[in-house]
Image (cartoon, helix red, strand yellow):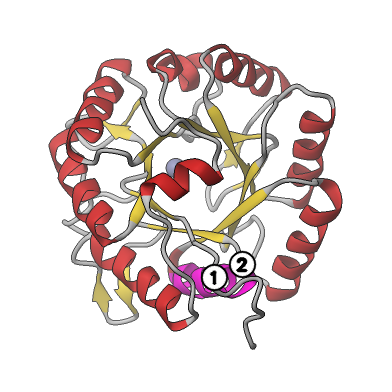
Amino acid sequence: MKINNKIKNKPTIICVALTGSVPRKKHNRNVPISINEQIESAHECFEEGATIAHCHVRNKDESISFSPDKFFKLKEGLRKYCKGMVIQFSTGGRYSLSKERGRMLSLKPDMASLSVGSNNFPNSVYSNPPELIDYLIEEMNKYKIKPEIEIFDLSHLFKAADLYKNKKINGNPYIQFVMGIKNAMPADKSVFNFYIKKIDKLFSNASWCAAGIGKYQSKINEWCIKKGGHTRTGMEDNIRLNKNMLAPSNASLVKLTADICKLNDRPIANWKQTRQILELPIKF
Ligand SMILES: [Zn+2]
């Protein structure tokens, strides 16, 4: 596919999803688990061009944590060592239906992920009841946090459009499509193209991004880059550099994505450009 001139030279934001809630050291020992490992990993990724750090935190035994104390330490470290990088907390922690998923929002990260509907995951239901969604939106509005809307299924896109139309959320929408999770939306090119078309119809001013899970990661990176979107990589979604090799670091995945940008004449957005695109303050 030829890249048209409007897309060429448009800066691409690379988001790195450092840790997530699934991969463990036994799957890839390079997955950063402790706060220090996460900060170090984010710093390497920042140097390779990633300007959003999507963050989950873990307990010592690698289980999922929602501890505001851990999120606080991570935020402090990222502000110090990755100056300008956009800090995005996940409110998507699996297996929890409670408001603990939003407890750390009072720490005022720049952004937070926001799921606006439910779907299946490989071995569970990813449950986002309307009441919990409303609560998370309220908290994000209260603390002036920009949501990144996660689209795991088509209905979520329509829900997002409804939220913006009814001014439940203000500002330019930032929408992320997640594709390639077993039992949810597959990494299907025609669906991807349909999503992008629909975004233009449903929103007048949205930016978008997509994440491919597992072996679909770099394929989705390429689709995004060629279509003029932003993109996400990192070990939360995929622990392999390629079919034969585990990723030596998050930074190696960022570099792979940055190389796809270069191949397609898409410059990588620096932190200031990223903040401008996302309408986030340059001074903080
Ligand atoms: Zn996440």
Location of the N terminus (image quadrant): bottom right
The percent position of residue 281, horizontal first and vertical second, equals 46, 30
User: Which element is circle 2 on?
Assistant: loop
Q: Residue at x 70, y 36 (%)?
A: 117
Q: Residue at x 53, y 48 (%)?
A: 123
Task: Determine which quarter of the picture holds residue 146.
Answer: top right
Horizontal side of 62 relative to 186 (left or right) equals: left
Residue 150 in view of the camera: yes
Q: Is residue 226 magenta?
A: yes
User: Which element is circle 1 on?
Assistant: helix
Q: Residue at x 86, y 53 (%)?
A: 201
For badge 1, the amino acid type reads Ile
Circles 1 and 2, Cβ within 8 Å, touching? The answer is no
- What whole-number distance in Å separates the C-alpha atoms at marks 1 and 2? 5 Å
As rendered, which of 169 and 281 lies closer to the eye? 281
Asked if 203 appears above or below 269 in the picture, the reply is: above
Residue 177 in view of the camera: no
> Ligand 1 near label 1 (Cβ, under 8 Å)?
no
Asked if 97 appears above or below 232 in the picture, the reply is: above
Q: What stretch of residues is rendered in magenta? A: 215-227
For badge 2, the amino acid type reads Gly
The percent position of residue 134, horizontal first and vertical second, equals 68, 18
Q: Is residue 258 magenta?
A: no
Q: Which mark is residue 225?
A: 1
The percent position of residue 51, horizontal first and vertical second, equals 37, 49
